[in-house]
Image: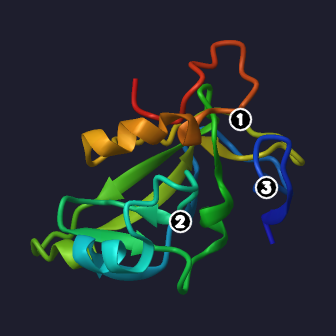
Amino acid sequence: MRFTVRSSPIHGRGLFARTHLAPGERLLEYKGERISSAQAHARYGDNTGTGHTFLFAPNAHFLIDAERGGSSARYINHSCEPNCEAVIFVNINGDEERDRVFIYALREIEAEQELSIDYAIELASDQALAHIERWACACGASACRGSMLAP
């Protein structure tokens, strides 16, 4: 196993490298049940109450719900200075439900380092702005912007 899930200084649990990872290396896929925005809303509401989600939107029509059938990629925490990035692979046949998300290393990651990506969350409604403090960042980076929201 190349990764382990354990307590994170950033938030809750995080995903940590067990071995050295090279820049540009494809690390793992963000997996889970494919659902529509309507299904996500039925399950989780607008989710502004917690600021916590395992949903990833690879396109405008479907989300990946890692709460159900997800991989360990769901434990990758946000950082304003991430060491990984999420790359969306669009299905060659145009089937948006089959678009995939892979996590790549942006730079060298040593064993025991926590993996992180910039969530760059975009809120769906102005009502969600009333709960903006729920999206506060705790990454501790020197250039922390104070929020997991898109700059």
Specify few, some or many for label 1: CA neighbours under 10 Å numbering under 14, 14-19, or 20 or more: some
Residue shown at 10% from the left, 75% from the top:
93
- Neighbor class of circle 3 (other Cα within 10 Å; few <14, some 14-19, many 20+) is few
| Residue at disc 3, secondary structure | loop
Of the residues under marks 2 and 1, which one precedes in the sequence? 2
Q: Which residue is mark 2?
A: 54
Q: Looking at the image, is 35 positioned above or below residue 75?
A: below
Residue plotted at (18% across, 59% down): 60
Give the image quarter of residue 107.
top right
Q: Give above or below for 68 relative to 150.
A: below
* Mark 2 or mark 3: whose residue is earlier in sequence: 3
Q: Which residue is mark 3?
A: 12
Residue at 71 percent of width and 32 percent of height: 139
Say what amino acid the circle numbered 1 marks. Glu
As measured in the structure, the alpha-carbon distance from the residue carrying label 2 to the one carrying label 1 is: 26 Å
Task: Using the numbered discs, state the Cα–Cα distance from disc 3 to disc 1 in whole angstroms.
Answer: 24 Å
Q: Secondary structure at mark 1?
A: loop
Identified by mark 3, the residue type is: Gly
- Viewer-proximal residue, 104 or 15? 15
In this view of the protein, can residue 37 be seen by the observer?
yes
Q: Mark 2 and mark 3: span between their CA atoms?
A: 13 Å
Residue that badge 1 annotates: 108
In the drawing, does residue 84 fall left or right of residue 119?
A: right
- Residue 105 appears left or right of 125: right
Q: Are marks 3 and 1 in contact (CB under 8 Å)?
A: no
Q: Is residue 71 above or below residue 103?
A: below
- What is the crowding at mark 2: few (fewer than 14 residues within 10 Å), some, or many (at least 20)? some
Which corner quadrant holds the C terminus?
top left
Which residue lies at the image location 55% right of the left edge and 29% below the top edge? Answer: 147
Q: Amino acid at mark 2?
A: Phe
